[in-house]
């Protein structure tokens, strides 16, 4: 697979499908270019995403300047034709908890590190495609 | 019934939250001299640490060397 195609939601959220390795069904993740990690999912998604706990915790600075400390786990994804293990921030809650895109859940946020070295493109209109592909 | 694994995790998290920032502050002058180091993972029980250009690199190096020791990750500023 040379590209991943998502969609801009009615709320103007750029969404990408999140393919958890070995799992069927559509899950979505919001692209958040203000997040410096790879993937962030709330604690409540731990089982659905087969998230593996680690003994690590990450400190970060929030948009309002406050700092927080969150657990770090691992999720295995099918990503651009490869199977990759992604270090994942697991806060107790996130802004996307319980959000859906049509009937499929939005389970996390994709940050800059998962997109590093790739091309991300979209027009910010509801229904338009969000495309991630190898940078040229 | 009390879930002991939850209690242990909460205790570990509290320890990381307390010891991590103090160790980071102590190590900072040394960390700033490490070339291409943008992230550090500190073993909060021993003070050992590993660095990397990304969080994943630092965490991978940490787990290779320190196994499942409690680790505090942060960007080097």
Image (spheres, rainbow, N blue to C red):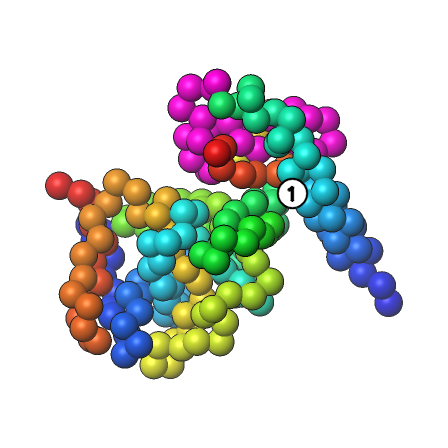
Tell which of A66 and A23 is nearer to you: A66
* Residue A128 image point, x, y percent: 17, 71
What residue is rendered at 40% in x and 52% in y? Answer: A35
Q: Quadrant of the N terminus of chain B?
A: bottom right
Q: Residue furthest front?
A: A65
Q: Is residue A114 magenta?
A: no
Which of the 4 quarters of the picture holds residue A33?
bottom left
- Label 1 neighbourhood size at 10 Å, few (<14), some (14-19), many (20+)? some
What residue is rendered at 53% in x and 35% in y? Answer: B59
Q: Is residue B22 visible?
A: yes
Magenta part of the chain: B33-58
Tell which of B75 and A31 is nearer to you: B75
Q: Is residue B47 magenta?
A: yes
- Number of disc labels: 1
Q: Is residue A46 visible?
A: no
Q: Residue furthest bottom?
A: A102
Which of the 4 quarters of the picture holds residue B50?
top right
* Residue A100 image point, x, y percent: 40, 77
What residue is rendered at 37% in x and 67% in y? Answer: A28
Q: Could you tell me which chain the residue with mark 1 belongs to?
A: A
- Determine which residue is flagged by label 1: A55
Which of the 4 quarters of the picture holds residue A57?
top right
Please state if B38 lies on the left or on the right of B44 as rendered: left
What residue is rendered at 41% in x and 70% in y? Answer: A106
């Amino acid at each position: 697979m040379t590209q991943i195609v998502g969609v801009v939601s009615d709320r103007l959220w750029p969404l990408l499908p999140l393919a958890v390795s070995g799992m069927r069904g559509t899950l979505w993740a919001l692209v958040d270019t203000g997040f410096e990690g790879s993937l962030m999912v709330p604690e409540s998604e731990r089982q659905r995403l087969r998230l593996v706990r680690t003994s690590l915790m990450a400190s970060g600075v929030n948009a309002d300047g406050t700092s927080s400390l969150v657990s770090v786990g691992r999720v295995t994804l099918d990503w651009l034709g490869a199977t990759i293990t992604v270090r994942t921030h697991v806060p107790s809650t996130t802004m996307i908890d319980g959000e859906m895109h049509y009937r499929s859940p939005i389970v996390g946020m994709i940050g800059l590190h998962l997109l590093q070295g790739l091309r991300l493109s979209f027009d910010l209109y509801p229904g338009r495609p969000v495309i991630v592909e190898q940078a040229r | 019934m009390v879930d002991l694994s939850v209690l242990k995790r909460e205790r570990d998290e509290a320890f990381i939250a307390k010891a991590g920032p103090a160790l980071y502050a102590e190590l900072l002058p040394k960390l700033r001299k490490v070339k291409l180091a943008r992230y550090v993972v500190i073993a909060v029980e021993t003070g050992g640490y590993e660095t990397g250009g990304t969080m994943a690199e630092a965490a991978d190096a940490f787990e290779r060397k320190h196994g499942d020791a409690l680790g505090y990750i942060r960007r080097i500023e």
